[in-house]
């Protein structure tokens, strides 16, 4: 056992409090990582509020990056000293995992949201042996100085890349970019409307620019986000509060969009994302909504359009995350413009700034 510091959510909807905890040695297939940075993701806040239930008290955090400090006896992908990004976990054995779709693992919820390993054990523990503490959030719980991950969700990245920046590639940025590059795959010259210009949506804007979309429209009520979207490759922006997004998309495209992405998790926004499409258009859903959220859609509209759920950008983590790092180092995917750093001890300020829209992607640094 080693001592570490983590940001613990004590109760549903509560505040994050940094406290000491104990971390067990990695098992044969596990990796101990010293965290350099961890992004604050919307999913962390949905789970804090039990929109997706997680047990409490718990250490959240699932966009970690850091340095491998120790590995279990069966680990072969990484070694001590390697720089890594931590991503989501999958079983590796179900029919979806075996056909190359790990983000759709049939055991995804249990392995990422249960607060423990599949066998029910827990690597983290409170200093008081009588006090409960859960971890293994996305098989990492990286709102901490150190984390235990599985070999399967640990992705080696180049050592010359800025490690503290890279954590959000494990979830939010991977999701937005992958939705375009891996899932929708728009052809050059096509049109796409991205509803929500947070870190996920702006990652999608950058990806759409990379593949040469002719019309890239970002819809967001925050003026600073709309301005940044234009700088990152959007050809037009829409403020949905004074403007009618559907009417404006029709003006900008003349016929409607070929593709759209819903990045907010809001039912009314999803309906707009579907209705802005031309017949044969495709809407990708990547916004995280509380479990049980329902939406009303016009069946006549749906008969000529496709709605596609997209998880984690449908990426092969071990290939896609290093590709994004390479694109960043080439200056073609400047995701660093989305990031604001905070000390781990200031996690509540980082969360408040995230929820207010003041920052796009807060990244916590333990040191």
Image (cartoon, rainbow, N blue to C red):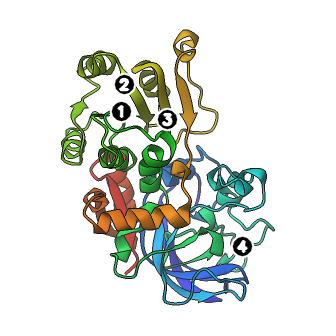
Asked whether 146 or 17 is in front, the reply is 146
- Residue for badge 2: 257
- The first of marks 3 and 4 along the sequence is 4
Residue drawn at the location 55% of the way across and 50% of the way down: 314
Residue 329 to residue 250: above or below: below
> What number is the disc on residue 209?
none
Give me the C-alpha separation between circle 1 and circle 2.
6 Å
Asked whether disc 1 touches disc 2, contact meaning CB atoms under 8 Å apart, the reply is yes
Asked whether disc 4 touches disc 2, contact meaning CB atoms under 8 Å apart, the reply is no
The quadrant in which residue 165 appears is: bottom left
Asked whether 308 or 163 is in front, the reply is 308
Give me the C-alpha separation between circle 1 and circle 3.
11 Å
- The first of marks 3 and 2 along the sequence is 2
- Residue for badge 3: 284
Give me the C-alpha separation between circle 4 and circle 2.
47 Å
Q: Nearer the viewer, mark 4 or mark 2?
A: 2
Q: Considering the numbered disc 3 on the image, is that residue within a helix, a strand or a loop?
A: strand
Give me the C-alpha separation between circle 1 and circle 4.
43 Å
Q: Considering the numbered disc 2 on the image, is that residue within a helix, a strand or a loop?
A: strand
The quadrant in which residue 295 appears is: top right
């Amino acid at each position: 056992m080693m001592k570490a510091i983590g940001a613990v959510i004590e109760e549903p909807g509560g505040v994050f409090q940094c406290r000491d905890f104990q971390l067990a040695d990695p098992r044969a297939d596990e990796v101990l990582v010293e965290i350099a940075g961890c992004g604050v993701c919307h999913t962390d806040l949905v789970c804090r509020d039990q929109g997706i239930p997680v047990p409490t008290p718990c250490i959240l955090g699932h966009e970690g990056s850091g340095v491998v400090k120790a590995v279990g006896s069966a680990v072969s992908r990484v070694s001590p000293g390697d720089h890594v990004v931590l991503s989501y976990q999958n079983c590796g054995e179900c029919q979806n995992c075996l056909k190359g779709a790990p983000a759709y693992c049939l055991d995804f919820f249990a392995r990422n949201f249960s607060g423990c390993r599949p066998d029910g054990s827990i690597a983290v523990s409170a200093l008081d042996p009588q006090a409960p503490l859960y971890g293994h959030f996305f098989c990492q719980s990286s709102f901490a100085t150190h984390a235990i991950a599985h070999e399967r969700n640990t992705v080696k990245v180049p050592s010359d890349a800025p490690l503290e920046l890279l954590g959000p590639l494990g979830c939010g940025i991977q999701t937005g970019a992958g939705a375009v590059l891996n899932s929708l795959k728009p052809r050059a010259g096509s049109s796409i409307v991205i509803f929500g210009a947070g870190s996920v949506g702006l990652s999608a804007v950058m990806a759409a620019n990379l593949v040469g979309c002719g019309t890239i429209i970002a819809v967001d009520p925050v003026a600073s986000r709309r301005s940044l979207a234009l700088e990152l490759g959007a050809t037009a922006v829409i403020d949905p509060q004074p403007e009618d997004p559907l009417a404006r998309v029709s003006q900008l495209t003349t016929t409607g969009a070929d593709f759209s992405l819903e990045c907010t998790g809001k039912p009314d926004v999803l309906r707009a994302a579907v209705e802005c499409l031309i017949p044969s258009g495709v809407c990708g859903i990547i916004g995280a909504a509380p479990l049980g959220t329902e939406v009303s859609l016009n069946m006549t509209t749906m008969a000529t359009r496709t709605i596609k759920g997209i998880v984690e950008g449908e990426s092969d983590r071990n290939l896609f995350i290093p590709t994004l790092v390479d694109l960043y180092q080439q200056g073609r995917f400047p995701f660093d413009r989305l990031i604001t750093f905070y000390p781990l001890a200031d996690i509540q300020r980082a969360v408040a700034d995230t929820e207010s829209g003041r920052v796009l992607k807060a990244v916590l640094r333990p040191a």
